[in-house]
Every structure is written in C-alpha cells, then in structure tokens.
Image (spheres, rainbow, N blue to C red):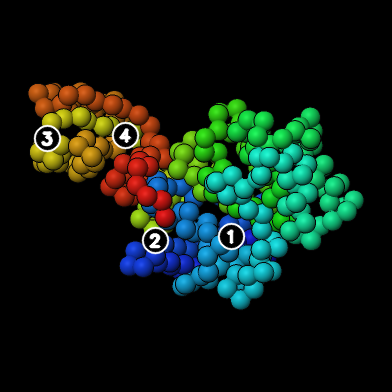
Amino acid sequence: MPIAPALSIRDVRFRYGEHEAVRGVSFDVAPGEVFALLGPNGSGKTTLFRLISTLVPLQEGEIDVLGTSLRQHPAAVRGYLGVVFQSPSIDKKLTVLENLLHHGRLYGLAGGTLKQKATTMIERLGLSDKLTASVETLSGGQRRRVELAQSMLHDPKVLVLDEPATGLDPGARSDIWRYFATLADEGVTILLTTHLLEEAERADRLGIMHQGELVALDTPLALQASLGGDTITLRTTDAQTLADQIASRFDFTPAVVDGTVRLEHPNGHQLIPQLVEAFGDQIDAVTLGKPTLEDVFIARTGHQFFSDTHES
C-alpha cells in the first residue's frame, strides 16, 4: 500500500488585501523526508510557512498534517509540529536550560520529565557544556541549536523551519544539516524555507516558488538534469538583438535574462566557437557551466534568482 504523506498541501491560496501571496500551491511531503521550499524574497514561501505552522488561518485550500486537517483541528496539528522561526524566539537573558524549561511548559511538560528531555536534547545538539550559559554569550550557530532543541522537546513528528541557516557560517550550517539527517533517519519529516541555493541542494526534494506559485518540484539532481547539457551566458550591450540574431542563425531560441543572453546546449564547448565566430563583435563575455538550481529557476521563470524584494 502507498505510504500516506506526512504533510499534504492542496490548492492553497492566500491574500494580503489585493495581493495574492500564495497562488494555488499543491504538494506532498513524505514521512522522514527533508523538503525545501526555495525562492527569493517575495516568492510566497514564508507565507506558506506561516500557514503550515498555524500562525495565520487558511483562506483557501487544505493542509493536512499526519492525516489531520489543519483547518478543522488546528490545535491537534500544533501538537504534531516543531516550529523554528527565522527571527530568534529564545530569551537571551536566560540560560540554555531555562529557555528549554520555559518552552517545554507551553507543551504541558513538567517536573523531572521536562528536565530530562531538556538535558537530553541539549546533549544531542552538542551544547552540554553550555547548559547554564546565558544565551547572549552563545554564537549564532549555538543559538540556532538551542531553538532546534526546544522545538523538538515534545517529540514532534513534523519539523517546519523558516530560513534556519540565514546568517550562519558554513560550519554552523553543516552542524544543522547533520542534525536534520539524524532526525530524518528517526522518521521526523522536515520542511524548511530557504533563499540559499546551496541549502536547497542538500534537501531530498524541493519545490521552487516564484510570485506565489510552485514552478518546479523534484529532487535537486533531477531538476538540474531537466535542463540537459551546458548553460551558456553571453554578456552584450544589446541582448535582445543578439538573441534574435542567434535564433535566426541556429536551431534554438535563447532567453534574454536581465540584460544577458542565456541558452542551454548539449555540447556548449562546441557551440561557443561558432557563436564567437558569428557574433564576436557583439559579445563582451562568455560563461560556460553545468546547469545549477539558479539555471532551473531562470528556465522556469525567465528571471534571475535574487533576494531584494519584500518577503511574503
């Protein structure tokens, strides 16, 4: 029998006034899967995080967590979820242990059981020597691990995180991803949002969001392979004219993206000399590379991947 998804999202839509931040998004996340929602600021991924974590009520569509309707039973769904926000949710003036004890009480934990769970989680995340340290004395990576520890105190089956690696150094990011792998091996389902391409590459599967829509959904390798061959980028003073001339001479149509001409070709290294010979006086620079997730984003949206708009 097919395994039921841990998280099921069906035709979810959400508006802020006249602005539609999420536009008919649908996907499933399997039990024990690490799933990333990738998109630049303003793509709608944080709004979707807020809906899944019950911070804002559903307007249209359905979300089920472990087979339970979020719309009909939001309190039950909250019990299944561990949530880590982008903005810090720990008290810097309290110690590591005090933060976990206060958080655990919100989930009905108390006494020796709570203290045992707190110390166990702190140990699992490599913070045993920081048990009585004030949070304000910790590094950014250590603080993030404290937030992870408190989010897992009540043994949630689904962990949702909004931009968990933002602002962390590479070492701290690697520590967090090792912990994600451990949780996934234990059957915990993880959904995270990110605008970092290198983060999304680590996920088992990812959905790419753009202007509120899900424009791609697959494993990172499958999405990159979907473009095929090589990616060629041509810098020029008149991208549209060069693209039109290339299209009329060769059997493909390049894309114009933010002032550059971009195209995919099975043998890019063989095509480049032909392009330079034909249009060398118009080409300022040529870049050749294998398809990346950014290339997938460009191919699906016609825009470069950037993060300079307001998040929604």
* Dots 3, 4 in contact, CB < 8 A: no
Give 275 or 58, whichever is nearer the viewer: 58
- Under circle 3, the secondary element is loop
Q: Which is more foreground, mark 3 or mark 4?
A: 3
Hey, what amino acid is under mark 3?
A: Asp
Instruction: Point out the tag, 2 or 3, that comes first from the N-terminus.
Output: 2
Hey, what amino acid is under mark 2?
A: Ala
What residue sits right under mark 4 in the picture? 231
Hey, what amino acid is under mark 1?
A: Ser
- Residue 198: % across, % down: 49, 35
Q: CA distance from mark 3 to mark 1?
A: 46 Å
Instruction: Point out the tag, 3 or 1, that comes first from the N-terminus.
Output: 1
What residue sits right under mark 1 in the picture? 53
Instruction: Point out the tag, 4 or 2, that comes first from the N-terminus.
Output: 2
Q: CA distance from mark 4 to mark 1?
A: 38 Å
Residue 219 shows in the view = no
Instruction: Point out the tag, 1 or 2, that comes first from the N-terminus.
Output: 2
Q: Which is more foreground, mark 3 or mark 1?
A: 1
Q: CA distance from mark 4 to mark 2?
A: 31 Å
* Dots 1, 2 in contact, CB < 8 A: no
- Under circle 4, the secondary element is strand
- Residue 90: % across, % down: 65, 45
User: Few, some or many C-alpha atoms within 10 Å of disc 4 (few <14, some 14-19, many ≥20)?
Assistant: many
What residue sits right under mark 3 in the picture? 238
Q: CA distance from mark 3 to mark 4?
A: 20 Å
